[in-house]
Amino acid sequence: MRSWKLRAAGAVALLFAHMLPATSQEQFPESAQPEVPEEIEEITVYGESNINILRRQFNLAQERMFELFNTLNSTDEFDIKCDYEQRLGSRRWHHVCTPKFNTRPQAHDGGQYFVTYDGEDKPSIQLPRVRRLNKELWEEMARLVNENPQLRQSFIDVAEKKTAYEAERERRRND
């Protein structure tokens, strides 16, 4: 049995040895040297984008933007953390970014909720405190995007990545 493994390993090594490019020791005379162009041409190839790569680029841009926002915002309650989670009934991992105030429900909010409709006849339970903080978060984010050029550029990058991802998704849906 051992000799069988040695023979198989030798056959595989021999197979790979034949696949390697042959090298030659001969030198070109100086007059026959291939000419190297002084300026290298740039070739741009447009191909089909991998939707998984586009989604990952969007998620990373979003995480970078929120990391920068977290360092600039006025309160830790507005810090936004991104993570991957599985939704009920789904096997796919979804990228979800949530503000800290939304991940730590307060005990006194338990009985104080009301139902709103988002325009698509889907009820949404919102706590008064969470609703107020959500409004304050958006106001602070808008203010910081206007004041900070680095955060503004990060916001633009996220928008571009999201547009590219959604365009590819829509293109594939229509094919």
Image (spheres, rainbow, N blue to C red):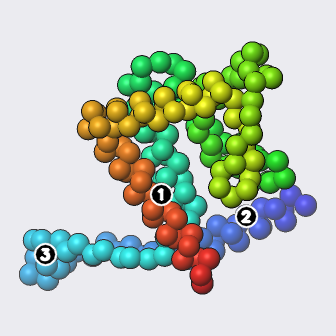
Quadrant placement of the N terminus? bottom right
**Is 40 placed left or right of 96 in the picture?**
left
Mark closer to the chain start, 1 or 3: 3
* Displayed quadrant of residue 99: top right
Q: Secondary structure at mark 2?
A: helix
Q: Amino acid at mark 1?
A: Lys
Mark closer to the chain start, 1 or 2: 2
Q: Are marks 1 and 2 in contact (CB under 8 Å)?
A: no
* Residue sitting at x 32%, y 42%: 152
* 28 is higher (above) or lower (below) than 83: below
Residue under numbered circle 3: 37
**Is 109 placed left or right of 19 in the picture?**
right
Q: Amino acid at mark 2?
A: Ala
Residue under numbered circle 1: 162
22 or 124: nearer the eye? Answer: 124
Give percent across and percent down for residue 21. Answer: 45, 75
Q: Secondary structure at mark 3?
A: loop
> Would residue 25 be seen by someone viewing this image from the given angle?
yes
45 or 33: nearer the eye? Answer: 45
> Would residue 29 be seen by someone viewing this image from the given angle?
no
Q: Amino acid at mark 3?
A: Pro
Which label was assigned to residue 9?
2
Give percent across and percent down for residue 19. Answer: 54, 76
